[in-house]
Amino acid sequence: MLNTLISRIKNWFPAEEVQAHCDGPCGVYDPSSARVTAEAVLSMTQKLIALELPNPSDKSAIIAYNNTFSRYVAIKEEQAHKTKEELLILWTDYFKPVHLEKFPDLHDTFWKAAKLCSSCKVEVSEAHAKELVETVEKIHKMFWQSKERDVSWYLAKPS
């Protein structure tokens, strides 16, 4: 009985058809958050590489070194994970099959970027961290070209 009543109400007052590009029709996409997090990965990687090993007989220096080292690693891994999340949202929610016509290497670019995020988490490689930033720049350019806008690429921390 209740189902019949609900069905009749739906027929009397049909809902408008809506279109959404993602789970929520926000319309807010921007690769800038991936740039910020990728740049943080590069910064933490460079800081890790620059850390000087303390004198093995200086216990307090070893403790300070281990604390700093572990904090840099934690931040690097967290930011690499956030970069991957931001890129996957762009890849899976924003970009559509129509974009493949303009960017035939779109899927390969995003796949490689996601793999670079993983590499940056499990290793301390300045080369991979720089490559991640460069790939995010490429995605930035694809994104803004898809919107027919010219948005400059910049780094918060110039190399």
Image (cartoon, grey):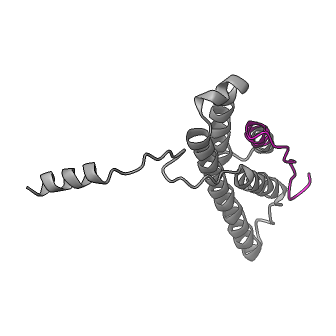
Residue 54 inside the magenta-drawn segment: no
| Residue occupying the point 73% across, 69% down | 62
Q: Is residue 37 left or right of residue 27?
A: right
Q: Residue 112's spot in the image, x, y percent?
A: 66, 33
Residue found at the very far left of the displayed protein: 1
* Residue 104 appearing in the image: no
Residues 126 and 69: in front is: 126
> In the picture, residue 126 is in which quadrant?
top right
Q: Is residue 137 left or right of residue 9?
A: right
Highlighted range, magenta: 136-159
Residues 40 and 97: in front is: 97
Residues 128 and 145: in front is: 145
Vertically, is 142 above or below 83? above
| Residue occupying the point 86% across, 58% down | 156
Q: Is residue 3 left or right of residue 14?
A: left
Q: Residue 45's spot in the image, x, y percent?
A: 77, 52
Residue found at the very far front of the displayed protein: 12
Q: Residue 113's spot in the image, x, y percent?
A: 68, 38
Quadrant in which the N terminus is drawn: bottom left
* Residue 63 appearing in the image: yes
Residue 150 inside the magenta-drawn segment: yes
